[in-house]
Every structure is written in structure tokens, then in C-alpha cells.
Image (tube, helix red, strand yellow):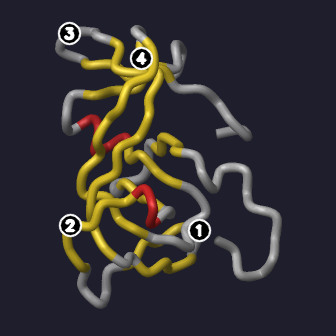
Amino acid sequence: MFSTGQIPFKLQNTWILDPSANTHVCNNKEDFTFLYLVAEDDYLIAGGNFIKIQAYGTVTITINTPTGKSKMKLSYIALAPTFFTNIVALSRATNNDIHFDLGRNVLYRLATSETVCYAKRLGGH
């Protein structure tokens, strides 16, 4: 992934939950299912950097649920292969009644209090 020969960043192949992000982001073309191209001026802005979005699509991720591992499909994902990690935008999840409880490290449905999946801290994130 890195053209500089650097050791990959430990979060490079990880999905992190970002409470301030408004776009899901995937940095791995192999995990990504293409839906459509983007406009010439579609960029992510992170840490003062502009990262070109290559396409939008879907990704299916593995999650840890109360009954074991399961799959979750995320839609309208921005493909940005040079982005440092993969992002699940909490604001997008909240729009679908999925919320985060920091004390228990779980995503849950507000309407039913059902646990959707467990989260864990990794590398201070």
C-alpha cells in the first residue's frame, strides 16, 4: 500500500469508529464493491490533507456480536486507497438508529437497546 517502503501503520487494515466523520471510508480496493464514480472535486479532508476519493460503493465487514462473529454491509463508502485507515462514520450509523455507548464499548439500537456489535480500543483509538 505504501510506496515509500514504510512499515504499514497498525490501523491501516482496521475499521475504526469515528464520531466526527460524516463519510464511511475504505482504503482497500479488494474489500470494496464498486457502485459509481465520483465527481472530479470529491475529496476527503483529514488533518489538513486532501485525499482524492476514487469511487463510492459498499463494503461488508466482520463484526463481533452477542452471538459471535457476523457480517455487516456498509453502504455509500468512499474508496480512498491512500487513507491511513478505514472509517465507520458514527453520524451515518446514528442516522440508522445505531448509537455508541463508550462506557460499554458497544454499538446498539436506541429503539430496542439491542447490542449490534462490540467495539474495542486499539492503538489509542
Seen in the picture, residue 72 relative to 118 is either above or below; the reply is: below
In contact (CB < 8 Å): disc 4 and disc 3: no
**Residue topped by disc 2:** 35
**Residue 117 versus residue 30: which sits nearer the camera?**
30
Closer to viewer: mark 2 or mark 3: 2
Disc 1 secondary structure class? loop
Kind of residue indicated by mark 4: Thr
Disc 4 secondary structure class? strand
Of the two numbered discs 1 and 4 on the same chain, state the one appearing first in sequence.
1
Looking at the rendered image, the quarter that the C terminus falls into is: top right
State how far apart marks 4 and 2 are (Cα). Answer: 28 Å
Residue 69 position within the rendered picture, expressed as x and y whole percent measured from the top left: 45, 21
State how far apart marks 1 and 3 are (Cα). Answer: 36 Å
Of the two numbered discs 4 and 3 on the same chain, state the one appearing first in sequence.
4
Numbered label attached to residue 47: 1
In contact (CB < 8 Å): disc 2 and disc 3: no
Point 44% across, 42% down: residue: 19
**Residue topped by disc 3:** 112
Point 37% across, 78% down: residue: 54
Residue 14 position within the rendered picture, expressed as x and y whole percent measured from the top left: 58, 46
Kind of residue indicated by mark 2: Leu
Q: From the viewer's perspective, is 76 left or right of 4?
A: left
Residue 108 position within the rendered picture, expressed as x and y whole percent measured from the top left: 33, 19
**Residue topped by disc 4:** 65
In contact (CB < 8 Å): disc 4 and disc 2: no
Kind of residue indicated by mark 3: Thr
Q: From the viewer's perspective, is 110 left or right of 100?
A: left
Of the two numbered discs 1 and 2 on the same chain, state the one appearing first in sequence.
2
